[in-house]
Amino acid sequence: MILIDKPYVSDFLIKTIKENKFQIIDTLNARKMISDESLNWISETEAKNAFEKNANIPIYTNSENTIAWIEENFNSSNLTEKIHVFKNKVKFRELLKESNPNYFFKEVKYKELKELNSKEMRFPFIIKPAVGFFSIAVHKVDNENEWNQVLGKIEIEIEEFKDLYPKEVIDINDFIIEEYINGEEYAIDCYFNNEGEPVILNILHHVFTSDKDVSDRVYTTSKEIILEYKSEISDFLKTIGLKANLKNFPAHVEVRIDDNRKVHPIEVNPLRFGGWCTTGDLSWYAYGINSYDYFLNAKKPDWEEIFKTREEKLYSIIILDNNSGIKEKDIEYFDYENLLKDLENPMDLRKVDYIKYSVFGILFAETSKGNEIEINQILTSNLKKYIKIK
């Protein structure tokens, strides 16, 4: 069954629900976002009864805004406990501590951050909300001099985004400070099947401009990216599945892989793939894999067959976050058409209310090998060339 909530549901996901006659829970928020009466709507009571009969029934949600509904309606199961372990990065680190006993992390109350003695801190480190989303209030701190600057930035970000998401998605009361791992960052869409075996649906390289960059601007997938660390990532996912006893459980997992090919956990986003229907939809554009169908119908990708026709291509999600330094209220419009002209093969553009979310849109793009410069250009762009000021 599928649970829909704000802020966004894609036409592709709605089409998938309709064509497969997947059960969709008839909540008030789902109805506000989807008006199609022909979908296989089931009542909240029916969903609750079905889950009580079978706690391993496959459930997919497009948004972590649904967590409050799950807690209210499925509170007698251990599903909510699993969600809390993954949503809270401190609990998640503790779950995997035995596998990486020397990894440093520390939980700190937000109100106590300013009281920390910076001389006793281990630099460099990453600081972020223990329960967070979308790289909000995430920072790398290299030395003592940067600490006060970062505290000021966190205060500003919290004030800007505090009303956008419920506390189940972003909770700024608690932060985690953890050691910085050198290496490359990857995002994985996967699910754990009825036997608890992890099934990988996509692997994306989260590209950054520098080791100080923590933004979500570009995620890229390709044959080479998937095959490079597929074995190590699969072993890592098996560890998570065993530790948390996961079955019929979809997840969007983020990791960092060091020079020794060791996989280090960043986070597991439960019951969904990438937020805003990004990575789940990209798998279709890139590989013809309908991730929602694959999870709910327990299918596995035939990667050998898939890669026969996708040898020379890269596929990217581009998050058009407003890093221009221009306040949204001072922007007359964003020139989407000009942006599309700068890309070899834009596959889908989703415009976003930038006044509310500080994001102009989400773009899916196909790039030929040898033309990676276009990915780097959009990665490093401040987007000012596309912004018309009032």
Image (cartoon, rainbow, N blue to C red):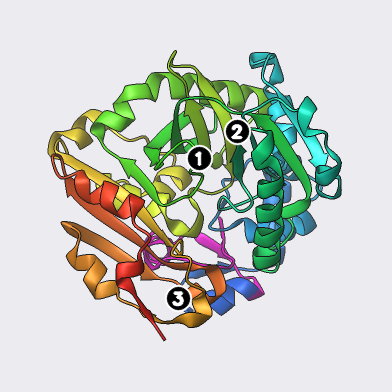
Circles 1, 2 touching at the beta carbon (< 8 Å): yes
* Residue 141 visible to an observer of this rendering: yes
Q: Which residue is mark 1?
A: 212
- The answer to whether 133 appears left or right of 377 in the picture is right
Q: Residue at x 58, y 50 (%)?
A: 59
Tell me which label, 1 or 3, sits earlier in the chain.
3
Q: Does 6 appear in magenta?
A: yes
Tell me which label, 3 or 2, sits earlier in the chain.
3
Residue situated in front as seen by the camera: 206 or 28: 206
Q: Bounds of the magenta span?
A: 1-28
Tell me which label, 1 or 2, sits earlier in the chain.
2
Q: Secondary structure at mark 1?
A: loop
The residues bearing labels 1 and 2 have C-alpha atoms spaced at a distance of 9 Å
Q: Residue at x 53, y 61 (%)?
A: 23
Amino acid type, mark 2: Asp
Image location (x, y in percent) of residue 92: 69, 32
Callout 3 crowding tier (Cα within 10 Å): few <14, some 14–19, many ≥20: few
Q: Which residue is mark 2?
A: 142
Residue situated in front as seen by the camera: 291 or 128: 128
